[in-house]
Image (cartoon, rainbow, N blue to C red):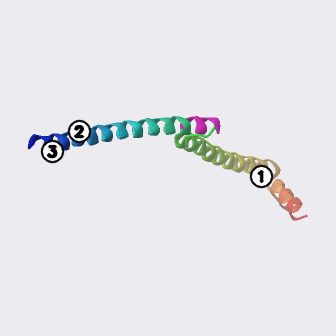
Amino acid sequence: MAQGPNRLLDDFAKLMTDAAGVAQGARREVETAFRAQAERFMSDMDLVTREEYDVVKDMAVRALDRIDELEARIDALESKKSGGRAKKTTDESSEN
């Protein structure tokens, strides 16, 4: 009889250990299914990654810088060609 209660406790401990393993496996399956569903949802929304966003942002900044450079060159050429008259004409038309 001394082995009876010990064996019962051992069986119970083994059962709890097995139940914990099953619970962990179920948790992993739920996490995997959730991740897959979230990835599917995000791909359907056609979102961009942070890296893609940063690349496009850098391209836009460079393009705006280039536009500023070209506008300055155009202003300089127009001033040179007309002796400064073109700048006054554009300033006068913006005041109206």
Q: Which residues are magenta?
A: 39-45
The residue to which callout 3 is attached is: 5
- Whichever of labels 3 and 2 marks the residue nearer the N terminus, that label is 3
Q: Could you say which is closer to the camera, residue 17 or residue 25?
A: 17
* Residue 79 marker: 1
**Residue under the image location 52 percent in, 34 percent down:** 36
Q: Quick check: marks 3 and 2 in contact, CB under 8 Å? A: no
Magenta stretch: includes residue 41:
yes
What is the spatial separation of the Cα atoms under label 3 and label 2, in whole angstroms? 14 Å
Q: Position of residue 16 (x, y in %)?
A: 28, 42
Residue 27: quarter of image: top left
Q: Quick check: marks 1 and 3 in contact, CB under 8 Å? A: no
The quarter of the picture where the C terminus appears is bottom right
Query: Which amino acid, by three-letter code, is at mark 3?
Result: Pro
What is the spatial separation of the Cα atoms under label 1 and label 3, in whole angstroms? 103 Å
* Mark 3 secondary-structure assignment: helix
Q: Is residue 3 above or below residue 90?
A: above
Side of 32 where 46 appears, left or right? right
* Residue 14 marker: 2
Side of 55 where 6 appears, left or right? left
Disc nearest the viewer among 1 and 3: 3
**Residue under the image location 19 percent in, 42 percent down:** 8
Query: Which amino acid, by three-letter code, is at mark 2?
Result: Lys
